[in-house]
Image: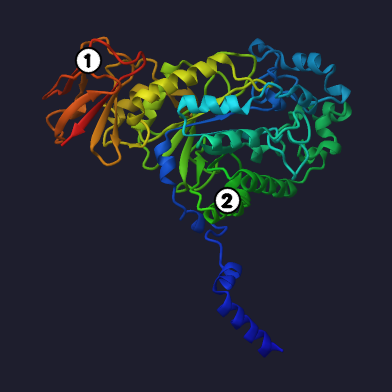
Amino acid sequence: MKKCFAILIVLVGFLLPNACEYVFAAEKYESTWDSLLKHELPEWLLDAKFGIYAHWGIYSVGIGPAWTEKHLYNPDFSKGKPDQNNLQEKFEKLVGGGLKDGKGYKDLIPFFTADKYDPVAWADLIVKSRAKFAGFSVSHHDGFGLWDSDVYEWNVGKMGPKRDLYGEFVKELRKRNVKVITTSHMYRTFGWMNPPKKFLKQAKEENWDVMNPKYKHFYPTDLNGGDYDEFLKQWDLKIREVIDKYHPDVIWFDGGKFMQDGICTGTLAYYFNQAAKRDQLVGILNKRPMRSEPPWFNFPDDFEMYDYEHGRDRPVVIDRPWIDSMTITGKGWSYSGYDGAVSSGEFIRNLIDNVARGGGILLSLAPRADGTIPQAQQQTLIEAGLWLDQNGEAIFGTRRWKYASDDSPEAEERQYLYTYRPGHTRWNFDQMSASDVRYTSAKNGSAIYVLTMGLPKEKTIIAKRFDAGEKVRIKSVSLLGCAEKIKWERTGEGLVIRVPHTLPNDKALAFRIDTK
């Protein structure tokens, strides 16, 4: 019998030479960091520079900040903080009772209606912005899924809007050849909504819903019988489901104990292997730590593309690809009743500086609970897109030149980095003017771009890096969006560019320096 079986295997292998290869072939990536670190970032992600996502979910009802679900179970949160909208009072008024009535964050789900959500309009707005990839958070820290999930019930496909909000958006983005990002914050959901210790006795006596075992899959915590190992397994299943359903081109994770728990290596290997089977070139955004010592915020130092939240603790010089995630509101990550947005000029200056340093921007929108995007946010995107239509060649597909600006890294650190809280720094460009220039380079080195951080008030721009010590030979100088011939001369001080009388835009200028 064994002999016959062996002959049968040989015959199958001979007649179907690909059969054994298909059955027994090993996956390309294994569930180890040694294997995962061999994955290479796709060229498209290095070229993209600008992506868009959104913080959108139950918390978008606008009664509080992005962490509404966490602050709701802290009665002290709104005390003495009129800027926090009196969260608990607004909650009680909206749902008709407080926590002691058995109500809680789950009772905000009916108010997250998405009844005016138009994925076609959203995707059209992305195209107008000229962002190269887009998506939104499939789940924030509250754990509520914005895709139609068969893995767990707490999602928009089963309650609330009862629509596949993420899937509808992905479909429209694919139609427009826009790459897709999935962002997820739910690794931190376990224990996220735990009341402060001083309120635990009160929470138990008043039967706050977060303490009720009935809701342990929505409020996973050891306070209501939730199990952390089970939570991790559910997290893995959720991410794999999103991978299988939507085939994201890039995934971003918020912080969590990824390195300590170890489960994520299997998830990431699955992502890379599934993409390889589809010949899809994908990447991971590796959120950097809030501090330099362990525990690390996300993944190993040599893994994929770095991500810095609002440039927090980002060094002046980074020796690998990176991107900043930032909010379009300038005030908070999600809709909280504020309809404003940073100006397109501020966004463009940030983008120019980041790209000059080898990075980019992942911009977060803050839609309302009904699915509408505030007009100010739309205006910023549309104006940024018009500027990129004109000047995109100095941004997209470029690489960092040997200099980012005319200042030394030490001078930049003194000038632009500030400590916003003990031990943490951010970047600030409030004092920028057109006399501050930034440099980018074409990938093949045939052109260098000089970009101004604003509109010039003087008649000339001086690019000091082209001084007598710089051996690059200049063939011509042109201004993107301007047909007028640009006059220039090279002096010991640098490249002196004559600014034309009529400027092509009112935001920032991009001069193309063609080299010999």
Identify whether 285 is placed above or below 19: above
Q: Is residue 38 left or right of residue 260?
A: left
Identify whether 355 is placed above or below 243: above
Question: Residue 218 sits in which quadrant?
Answer: top right
Q: Amino acid at mark 2?
A: Tyr
Residue occupying the point 15% across, 31% down:
474
Could you tell me residue 367's position as x and y percent? 62, 22
Identify whether 308 is placed above or below 344: below
The secondary element bearing badge 2 is classed as helix
State the mark number for residue 271: 2
Could you tell me residue 449's position as x and y percent? 27, 29
For label 1, the residue is: 499
State the mark number for residue 451: none
Q: Is residue 87 left or right of residue 211?
A: left
Could you tell me residue 179's position as x and y percent? 51, 38
The secondary element bearing badge 1 is classed as loop
Judging depth in this view, the residue of 77 and 35 nearest the camera is 35
The C terminus sits in image quarter: top left
Question: Residue 21 sits in which quadrant?
Answer: bottom right
